[in-house]
Amino acid sequence: MPPKRASKRAQAAEKIASLPPSDNHSDTESTAEPPAPSFKGQLSKFQYTSAASTSENATRRPDTKTILPDLVPTRLGTPTSPAPPRSSKRTRTTVTTATTDPQTTPSPRPSKKRKPSSYAPPSKYAHLSPLVDILEPNLICVFVGTNPGVQTATQGHAYAHPSNHFWKLLYASGLTERRLSPTEDRSLPARYCMGNTNIVSRPSKDAAELSREEMVAGAGELEAKFRVYRPETVCIVGKGIWEAIWRNKMGRAMRKEEFRYGWQNEGMNMGKVEGEGEDAWKGSKVFVTTSTSGLAANLKPAEKEAIWRPFGEWVRKRREERGFVPRSDESVEGGR
Protein backbone atom coordinates (compact mmCIF):
# COMPACT_ATOMS: atom_id res chain seq x y z
CA MET A 1 0.00 0.00 0.00
CA PRO A 2 1.35 3.41 -0.82
CA PRO A 3 2.52 5.53 2.12
CA LYS A 4 -0.02 8.33 1.54
CA ARG A 5 -2.98 5.97 1.74
CA ALA A 6 -1.64 4.37 5.02
CA SER A 7 -1.18 7.80 6.51
CA LYS A 8 -4.75 8.75 5.72
CA ARG A 9 -6.05 5.62 7.42
CA ALA A 10 -4.01 6.28 10.55
CA GLN A 11 -5.39 9.78 10.76
CA ALA A 12 -8.93 8.47 10.43
CA ALA A 13 -8.36 5.97 13.26
CA GLU A 14 -7.12 8.69 15.54
CA LYS A 15 -10.22 10.79 14.88
CA ILE A 16 -12.49 7.86 15.73
CA ALA A 17 -10.68 7.21 18.97
CA SER A 18 -11.09 10.75 20.11
CA LEU A 19 -14.87 10.76 19.63
CA PRO A 20 -17.05 10.44 22.84
CA PRO A 21 -18.86 7.18 23.47
CA SER A 22 -22.33 6.88 21.94
CA ASP A 23 -25.49 5.79 23.82
CA ASN A 24 -26.41 3.40 21.09
CA HIS A 25 -24.01 0.52 20.77
CA SER A 26 -25.07 -1.71 17.99
CA ASP A 27 -22.03 -3.26 16.35
CA THR A 28 -18.73 -2.12 14.87
CA GLU A 29 -20.26 -1.43 11.43
CA SER A 30 -22.16 1.54 12.76
CA THR A 31 -19.05 3.10 14.16
CA ALA A 32 -16.48 2.07 11.58
CA GLU A 33 -15.13 4.74 9.05
CA PRO A 34 -16.09 3.83 5.52
CA PRO A 35 -13.06 3.16 3.40
CA ALA A 36 -11.68 6.21 1.45
CA PRO A 37 -12.48 6.14 -2.20
CA SER A 38 -9.71 4.95 -4.44
CA PHE A 39 -8.09 7.02 -7.20
CA LYS A 40 -10.07 5.15 -9.84
CA GLY A 41 -13.24 5.86 -7.97
CA GLN A 42 -12.58 9.56 -7.88
CA LEU A 43 -11.75 9.49 -11.57
CA SER A 44 -14.96 7.65 -12.35
CA LYS A 45 -16.93 10.19 -10.29
CA PHE A 46 -15.31 13.08 -12.18
CA GLN A 47 -16.09 11.46 -15.51
CA TYR A 48 -19.70 10.95 -14.49
CA THR A 49 -20.05 14.56 -13.37
CA SER A 50 -18.52 15.88 -16.59
CA ALA A 51 -20.75 13.65 -18.69
CA ALA A 52 -23.82 14.83 -16.81
CA SER A 53 -22.85 18.46 -17.28
CA THR A 54 -22.23 17.89 -20.98
CA SER A 55 -25.56 16.13 -21.33
CA GLU A 56 -27.33 19.01 -19.58
CA ASN A 57 -25.73 21.55 -21.93
CA ALA A 58 -26.64 19.42 -24.92
CA THR A 59 -30.20 19.33 -23.69
CA ARG A 60 -30.38 23.15 -23.46
CA ARG A 61 -28.90 23.90 -26.95
CA PRO A 62 -32.02 22.99 -28.91
CA ASP A 63 -33.87 25.67 -26.93
CA THR A 64 -31.27 28.22 -27.95
CA LYS A 65 -31.51 27.19 -31.63
CA THR A 66 -35.25 27.52 -31.58
CA ILE A 67 -34.95 31.04 -30.19
CA LEU A 68 -32.30 32.32 -32.65
CA PRO A 69 -34.46 32.11 -35.77
CA ASP A 70 -37.03 34.28 -34.03
CA LEU A 71 -34.43 36.81 -32.97
CA VAL A 72 -32.65 37.15 -36.28
CA PRO A 73 -35.71 38.12 -38.38
CA THR A 74 -36.76 40.51 -35.64
CA ARG A 75 -33.40 42.25 -35.81
CA LEU A 76 -32.91 42.24 -39.62
CA GLY A 77 -36.50 42.49 -40.73
CA THR A 78 -38.37 40.24 -43.19
CA PRO A 79 -38.90 41.02 -46.92
CA THR A 80 -42.61 41.35 -46.39
CA SER A 81 -42.33 43.76 -43.49
CA PRO A 82 -43.34 47.30 -44.58
CA ALA A 83 -40.49 49.79 -44.91
CA PRO A 84 -40.64 52.76 -42.58
CA PRO A 85 -42.19 55.80 -44.27
CA ARG A 86 -39.63 58.19 -45.77
CA SER A 87 -39.86 61.80 -44.88
CA SER A 88 -40.88 63.98 -47.85
CA LYS A 89 -39.84 67.19 -46.14
CA ARG A 90 -36.33 67.14 -47.52
CA THR A 91 -37.54 66.32 -51.04
CA ARG A 92 -39.98 69.20 -51.01
CA THR A 93 -37.29 71.52 -49.72
CA THR A 94 -34.88 70.43 -52.46
CA VAL A 95 -37.45 70.97 -55.21
CA THR A 96 -38.38 74.36 -53.87
CA THR A 97 -34.74 75.40 -53.70
CA ALA A 98 -34.07 74.22 -57.26
CA THR A 99 -36.94 76.23 -58.66
CA THR A 100 -36.46 79.39 -56.68
CA ASP A 101 -32.70 79.67 -56.27
CA PRO A 102 -31.52 82.34 -58.73
CA GLN A 103 -28.07 80.76 -58.86
CA THR A 104 -29.35 77.42 -60.20
CA THR A 105 -32.13 78.83 -62.39
CA PRO A 106 -30.95 82.01 -64.11
CA SER A 107 -33.61 84.27 -65.45
CA PRO A 108 -33.87 84.34 -69.27
CA ARG A 109 -31.85 87.09 -70.87
CA PRO A 110 -33.94 89.50 -72.91
CA SER A 111 -33.37 89.04 -76.62
CA LYS A 112 -31.85 91.98 -78.39
CA LYS A 113 -33.83 92.96 -81.45
CA ARG A 114 -32.49 95.32 -84.06
CA LYS A 115 -34.52 98.49 -83.98
CA PRO A 116 -35.95 99.14 -87.44
CA SER A 117 -34.62 102.20 -89.20
CA SER A 118 -36.73 105.12 -90.33
CA TYR A 119 -36.15 108.13 -92.52
CA ALA A 120 -33.05 110.16 -91.66
CA PRO A 121 -32.44 113.61 -93.18
CA PRO A 122 -29.28 114.20 -95.24
CA SER A 123 -27.85 116.34 -92.44
CA LYS A 124 -27.39 113.24 -90.27
CA TYR A 125 -24.61 111.97 -92.55
CA ALA A 126 -23.45 115.28 -93.97
CA HIS A 127 -19.95 114.56 -92.65
CA LEU A 128 -19.62 111.61 -95.07
CA SER A 129 -18.69 112.07 -98.71
CA PRO A 130 -20.76 110.59 -101.56
CA LEU A 131 -19.26 107.66 -103.43
CA VAL A 132 -17.62 108.41 -106.77
CA ASP A 133 -19.32 106.78 -109.78
CA ILE A 134 -17.24 104.24 -111.71
CA LEU A 135 -18.33 104.94 -115.29
CA GLU A 136 -16.88 104.98 -118.78
CA PRO A 137 -18.62 105.18 -122.15
CA ASN A 138 -19.82 102.01 -123.86
CA LEU A 139 -19.30 99.54 -121.02
CA ILE A 140 -20.87 96.11 -121.30
CA CYS A 141 -22.72 96.60 -118.00
CA VAL A 142 -23.13 99.02 -115.11
CA PHE A 143 -24.30 97.87 -111.68
CA VAL A 144 -26.86 100.03 -109.88
CA GLY A 145 -26.90 99.92 -106.08
CA THR A 146 -29.18 101.71 -103.63
CA ASN A 147 -26.80 104.20 -101.98
CA PRO A 148 -23.48 104.14 -100.09
CA GLY A 149 -23.57 102.70 -96.60
CA VAL A 150 -21.70 104.36 -93.75
CA GLN A 151 -18.68 102.06 -94.02
CA THR A 152 -18.63 102.31 -97.81
CA ALA A 153 -18.68 106.11 -97.64
CA THR A 154 -16.02 106.12 -94.94
CA GLN A 155 -13.65 103.90 -96.93
CA GLY A 156 -14.55 105.41 -100.30
CA HIS A 157 -15.04 102.04 -102.01
CA ALA A 158 -18.18 100.31 -103.24
CA TYR A 159 -19.79 97.55 -101.16
CA ALA A 160 -17.10 97.82 -98.48
CA HIS A 161 -19.08 96.38 -95.57
CA PRO A 162 -17.88 92.84 -94.71
CA SER A 163 -21.43 91.49 -94.61
CA ASN A 164 -22.18 92.61 -98.18
CA HIS A 165 -22.03 89.80 -100.76
CA PHE A 166 -21.51 91.90 -103.90
CA TRP A 167 -17.90 90.90 -104.57
CA LYS A 168 -18.61 87.31 -103.63
CA LEU A 169 -21.52 87.08 -106.09
CA LEU A 170 -19.48 88.67 -108.88
CA TYR A 171 -17.00 85.85 -108.51
CA ALA A 172 -19.62 83.09 -108.01
CA SER A 173 -21.48 84.11 -111.19
CA GLY A 174 -18.33 84.25 -113.32
CA LEU A 175 -18.29 88.03 -113.76
CA THR A 176 -14.77 88.04 -112.26
CA GLU A 177 -12.19 85.25 -112.31
CA ARG A 178 -11.48 85.74 -108.59
CA ARG A 179 -13.03 87.46 -105.60
CA LEU A 180 -12.04 91.10 -105.69
CA SER A 181 -11.47 93.41 -102.75
CA PRO A 182 -13.58 96.57 -102.39
CA THR A 183 -10.36 98.56 -102.89
CA GLU A 184 -10.25 97.21 -106.46
CA ASP A 185 -13.62 98.69 -107.41
CA ARG A 186 -12.14 101.33 -109.71
CA SER A 187 -10.42 98.67 -111.80
CA LEU A 188 -13.76 97.27 -113.02
CA PRO A 189 -13.88 99.19 -116.35
CA ALA A 190 -10.30 98.38 -117.36
CA ARG A 191 -10.33 94.74 -116.33
CA TYR A 192 -13.90 93.63 -116.93
CA CYS A 193 -15.68 96.33 -119.00
CA MET A 194 -18.06 96.93 -116.07
CA GLY A 195 -18.97 99.98 -113.95
CA ASN A 196 -20.92 100.97 -110.85
CA THR A 197 -23.29 103.71 -109.65
CA ASN A 198 -26.20 104.21 -107.19
CA ILE A 199 -29.79 105.39 -107.46
CA VAL A 200 -29.23 107.78 -104.49
CA SER A 201 -25.85 109.41 -103.95
CA ARG A 202 -26.05 110.44 -100.28
CA PRO A 203 -24.86 107.96 -97.61
CA SER A 204 -27.09 106.42 -94.93
CA LYS A 205 -27.06 103.47 -92.58
CA ASP A 206 -29.49 101.52 -94.76
CA ALA A 207 -32.18 102.00 -97.40
CA ALA A 208 -34.90 102.55 -94.78
CA GLU A 209 -33.39 105.97 -94.03
CA LEU A 210 -34.15 107.11 -97.59
CA SER A 211 -37.51 108.50 -98.67
CA ARG A 212 -39.58 107.19 -101.57
CA GLU A 213 -39.33 110.58 -103.23
CA GLU A 214 -35.52 110.38 -103.12
CA MET A 215 -35.57 106.97 -104.75
CA VAL A 216 -37.90 108.02 -107.57
CA ALA A 217 -35.91 111.20 -108.18
CA GLY A 218 -32.74 109.10 -108.28
CA ALA A 219 -34.27 106.93 -110.99
CA GLY A 220 -34.60 110.03 -113.19
CA GLU A 221 -30.93 110.85 -112.57
CA LEU A 222 -29.95 107.33 -113.64
CA GLU A 223 -31.73 107.83 -116.96
CA ALA A 224 -29.66 110.95 -117.56
CA LYS A 225 -26.38 109.18 -116.74
CA PHE A 226 -27.10 106.31 -119.08
CA ARG A 227 -27.93 108.65 -121.95
CA VAL A 228 -24.42 110.03 -121.59
CA TYR A 229 -22.41 106.84 -121.03
CA ARG A 230 -24.69 104.43 -122.92
CA PRO A 231 -23.79 101.09 -121.34
CA GLU A 232 -25.01 98.03 -123.19
CA THR A 233 -26.85 96.77 -120.07
CA VAL A 234 -27.58 97.87 -116.54
CA CYS A 235 -27.78 95.38 -113.67
CA ILE A 236 -30.23 96.46 -110.94
CA VAL A 237 -28.90 95.15 -107.60
CA GLY A 238 -32.11 94.75 -105.59
CA LYS A 239 -35.88 94.68 -105.93
CA GLY A 240 -36.42 98.02 -104.16
CA ILE A 241 -34.29 99.85 -106.74
CA TRP A 242 -36.28 98.39 -109.60
CA GLU A 243 -39.58 99.33 -107.96
CA ALA A 244 -38.42 102.97 -107.77
CA ILE A 245 -37.36 102.93 -111.45
CA TRP A 246 -40.70 101.38 -112.38
CA ARG A 247 -42.61 104.08 -110.50
CA ASN A 248 -40.58 106.77 -112.27
CA LYS A 249 -41.29 105.24 -115.69
CA MET A 250 -44.89 104.14 -115.22
CA GLY A 251 -46.12 106.79 -112.79
CA ARG A 252 -47.51 104.15 -110.41
CA ALA A 253 -46.42 101.42 -108.03
CA MET A 254 -45.47 98.03 -109.35
CA ARG A 255 -48.02 95.28 -108.75
CA LYS A 256 -46.82 92.09 -107.15
CA GLU A 257 -47.40 89.98 -110.26
CA GLU A 258 -45.44 92.45 -112.39
CA PHE A 259 -42.13 91.84 -110.63
CA ARG A 260 -39.64 89.27 -111.86
CA TYR A 261 -35.90 88.75 -111.65
CA GLY A 262 -33.77 88.53 -114.77
CA TRP A 263 -34.14 90.27 -118.13
CA GLN A 264 -36.91 92.86 -118.51
CA ASN A 265 -38.76 93.67 -121.72
CA GLU A 266 -37.30 96.20 -124.15
CA GLY A 267 -39.88 98.81 -123.24
CA MET A 268 -38.18 99.16 -119.86
CA ASN A 269 -34.74 99.97 -121.32
CA MET A 270 -32.99 102.83 -119.52
CA GLY A 271 -31.46 105.99 -121.03
CA LYS A 272 -33.39 105.68 -124.25
CA VAL A 273 -33.00 108.61 -126.68
CA GLU A 274 -35.99 109.23 -128.93
CA GLY A 275 -35.56 110.55 -132.44
CA GLU A 276 -33.82 109.67 -135.65
CA GLY A 277 -30.26 109.70 -136.82
CA GLU A 278 -27.10 109.15 -134.84
CA ASP A 279 -28.48 110.63 -131.64
CA ALA A 280 -31.26 108.09 -131.39
CA TRP A 281 -30.56 105.23 -129.05
CA LYS A 282 -32.70 102.31 -127.93
CA GLY A 283 -31.32 102.43 -124.37
CA SER A 284 -29.62 99.97 -122.03
CA LYS A 285 -31.20 96.58 -121.52
CA VAL A 286 -32.16 95.85 -117.90
CA PHE A 287 -31.33 92.77 -115.82
CA VAL A 288 -32.76 92.70 -112.27
CA THR A 289 -30.93 90.66 -109.69
CA THR A 290 -31.01 90.23 -105.92
CA SER A 291 -29.81 92.61 -103.26
CA THR A 292 -26.34 91.82 -101.93
CA SER A 293 -26.91 93.38 -98.52
CA GLY A 294 -26.34 91.15 -95.51
CA LEU A 295 -29.75 92.27 -94.22
CA ALA A 296 -31.52 90.77 -97.24
CA ALA A 297 -32.09 87.24 -95.97
CA ASN A 298 -35.28 86.39 -97.85
CA LEU A 299 -33.30 84.22 -100.30
CA LYS A 300 -30.69 81.58 -99.57
CA PRO A 301 -27.14 82.06 -100.93
CA ALA A 302 -27.64 79.29 -103.49
CA GLU A 303 -30.83 80.95 -104.73
CA LYS A 304 -29.06 84.28 -105.12
CA GLU A 305 -26.25 82.68 -107.09
CA ALA A 306 -28.78 80.99 -109.38
CA ILE A 307 -30.29 84.41 -110.21
CA TRP A 308 -26.91 86.04 -110.78
CA ARG A 309 -25.37 83.24 -112.87
CA PRO A 310 -27.24 83.85 -116.18
CA PHE A 311 -26.09 87.45 -116.19
CA GLY A 312 -22.48 86.40 -115.61
CA GLU A 313 -22.68 83.99 -118.53
CA TRP A 314 -24.11 86.69 -120.79
CA VAL A 315 -21.40 89.23 -119.88
CA ARG A 316 -18.59 86.73 -120.53
CA LYS A 317 -20.08 85.96 -123.91
CA ARG A 318 -20.28 89.65 -124.83
CA ARG A 319 -16.63 90.14 -123.89
CA GLU A 320 -15.67 87.39 -126.30
CA GLU A 321 -17.90 88.78 -129.06
CA ARG A 322 -16.44 92.23 -128.60
CA GLY A 323 -12.91 90.91 -128.41
CA PHE A 324 -12.45 92.68 -125.11
CA VAL A 325 -8.89 92.67 -123.80
CA PRO A 326 -8.31 93.71 -120.17
CA ARG A 327 -5.96 96.62 -119.85
CA SER A 328 -3.62 97.39 -116.99
CA ASP A 329 -4.00 100.66 -115.18
CA GLU A 330 -1.31 101.44 -112.65
CA SER A 331 -3.28 104.41 -111.37
CA VAL A 332 -6.07 102.15 -110.15
CA GLU A 333 -5.88 101.62 -106.38
CA GLY A 334 -5.45 97.95 -105.57
CA GLY A 335 -4.25 97.11 -109.09
CA ARG A 336 -1.89 94.20 -109.56
Image: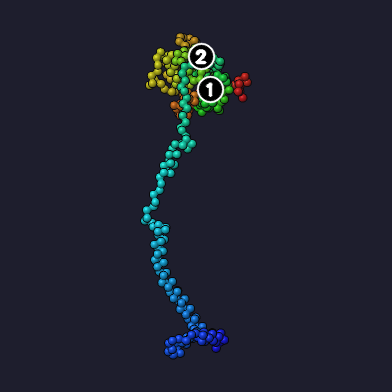
Circles 1 and 2 in contact, beta carbons < 8 Å: no
Q: Position of residue 22 (x, y in %)?
A: 45, 86
Q: Quadrant of the C terminus?
A: top right
Q: Position of residue 63 (x, y in %)?
A: 40, 68
Query: Residue 244 appears in which quarter of the rendering?
Result: top left
Total number of numbered discs in the rendering: 2
Q: Is residue 1 above or below residue 150?
A: below
Q: Nearer the viewer, residue 136 or 186?
A: 186
Hey, what amino acid is under mark 2? Answer: Pro
The circle drawn on residue 159 is 1
On screen, residue 116 versus residue 136, left or right, reads: left
The residues bearing labels 1 and 2 have C-alpha atoms spaced at a distance of 20 Å
| Residue matched to label 2 | 122
Q: Nearer the viewer, residue 82 or 336?
A: 82
The circle drawn on residue 191 is none
Hey, what amino acid is under mark 1? Answer: Tyr
Q: Nearer the viewer, residue 98 or 329?
A: 98
The residue drawn where x is 53% and y is 22% is: 159
Is residue 159 at all visible to an observer of this figure? yes
Is residue 170 at all visible to an observer of this figure? no
For numbered disc 2, what is the local secondary structure?
helix
Q: Position of residue 106 (x, y in %)?
A: 47, 34
The residue drawn where x is 45% and y is 20% is: 240
For numbered disc 1, what is the local secondary structure?
loop
